[in-house]
Image (cartoon, rainbow, N blue to C red):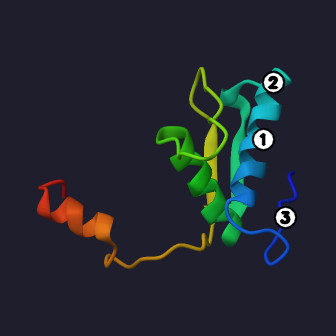
Amino acid sequence: MVIIALAPKASFPSQLRQAIAALAYLLAQGTKASNIVLVGDSAGGNLILQLVSHILHPMAGLPPPPILSKPLAAIVLVSPWTSYSDDYRSFKHQQTSGNK
């Protein structure tokens, strides 16, 4: 289990940096990606989504995501803290570009 720094003591992207480091540590210790299950509750669920998003689409200004030789065993999101709004610029762009 990884204890992530909470707001207001730490702000974004501190928590994501910690999650990247934790996953990189597990892999460096020889743990196979196929044996890793990422679990997050509430804001932790959002953090797991951020980590997976960073693995798939690396974000500038953050440490590079670990290279996975195989997929993770699973991700489990328990009541993730997310937005269900479709009023974001990226949603509108996808709708107008035909990527529905």
Going from the N terminus, do you reach mark 3 or mark 2 first? 3
Q: Mark 1 highlights which residue?
A: 21
Label 1 neighbour load within 10 Å: few <14, some 14-19, many 20+: some
Residue drawn at (34%, 73%), measured in percent from left and top? 88
Cα separation, mark 2 vs mark 1, equals 10 Å
Spot occupied by residue 90 in the image (x, y as percentages of width and height): 31, 64
Q: Amino acid type of disc 2?
A: Ala
Q: Is residue 76 above or below residue 73?
A: below
Q: Nearer the viewer, residue 34 or 9?
A: 9
Q: Mark 2 highlights which residue?
A: 28
Spot occupied by residue 58 in the image (x, y as percentages of width and height): 52, 41
Label total for image: 3
Dot 2 falls on a residue whose secondary structure is helix
Cα separation, mark 3 vs mark 2, equals 22 Å
Q: Mark 3 highlights which residue?
A: 5
Q: Amino acid type of disc 1?
A: Ala
Going from the N terminus, do you reach mark 2 or mark 1 first? 1
Q: Is residue 87 above or below residue 99?
A: below
Would you identify the image quadrant in which residue 73 lies?
top right
